[in-house]
């Protein structure tokens, strides 16, 4: 499993909003400048986070984005899954009808790794990363 720039940047955006909003809206331009992310790519990431309900938006001069919840209420695993999809190390972990599953000598290993990954990312919040 490899986390793409989309997942990494989504975490940076969420942290930026948590640290800089003071309950006010933050413009994409400000986030882009602080995080050194292109506006075009940032717009794609923010659209995903907004669709997931993680961000609140406002238009106009004082518009922008802010978090819909407190940082301690965002699990890192949820943010990564929204941007990356399934975090499984191999595809067959999620396949219901894998014909090799019963005789696969490595399935237990991959399943264990999947559990470790998910337990870890689900044990950390946005607030944990800020601290």
Image: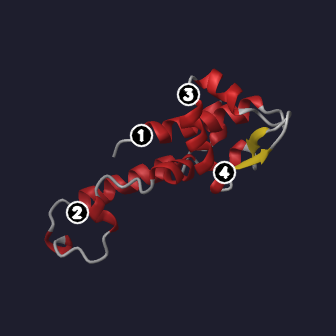
Q: Earlier in the sequence, mark 4 or mark 1?
A: 1
Relative to 65, 109 lies left or right = left
Q: Quadrant of residue 52?
A: bottom right
Query: Where does the image place residue 58, in percent across and percent down from the top left?
Result: 81, 44
Query: Where does the image place residue 34, in percent across and percent down from the top left?
Result: 64, 22
Cβ–Cβ under 8 Å for marks 3 and 2: no
Residue depth check, mark 3 versus mark 2: number of the one nearer the observer: 3
Q: Secondary structure at mark 3?
A: loop
Residue 118 higher or lower than 30, as above or below? below
Query: Where does the image place residue 84, in percent across and percent down from the top left?
Result: 45, 50
Q: Earlier in the sequence, mark 1 or mark 3?
A: 1
Characterize the local packing of mark 4: few (<14), some (14-19) or many (20 or more) Cα atoms within 10 angstroms: some
Which mark is drawn over residue 50? 4
Q: CA distance from mark 4 to mark 2?
A: 36 Å
Name the residue that disc number 3 marks.
37
Q: Secondary structure at mark 1?
A: loop
Q: CA distance from mark 3 to mark 2?
A: 39 Å
Q: Secondary structure at mark 2?
A: helix
Q: Residue at x 86, y 34 (%)?
A: 62
Q: Residue at x 63, y 27 (%)?
A: 32
Residue 112 higher or lower than 46, as above or below? below
Which mark is drawn over residue 107? 2
Residue 118 higher or lower than 96, as above or below? above
């Amino acid at each position: 499993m490899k986390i793409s720039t989309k997942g990494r940047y989504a975490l940076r955006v969420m942290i930026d909003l948590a640290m800089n909003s003071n309950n006010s809206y933050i413009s994409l331009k400000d986030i882009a400048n602080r995080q050194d992310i292109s506006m075009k790519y940032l717009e794609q990431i923010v659209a995903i986070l907004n669709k997931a309900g993680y961000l609140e938006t406002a238009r106009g001069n004082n518009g922008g984005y802010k978090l819909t919840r407190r940082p301690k209420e965002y699990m890192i695993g949820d943010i990564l899954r929204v941007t990356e999809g399934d975090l499984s190390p191999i595809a067959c972990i999620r396949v219901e009808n894998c014909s090799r599953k019963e005789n696969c000598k490595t399935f237990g290993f991959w399943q264990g790794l999947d559990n470790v990954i998910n337990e870890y990312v689900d044990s950390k919040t946005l607030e944990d990363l800020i601290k």
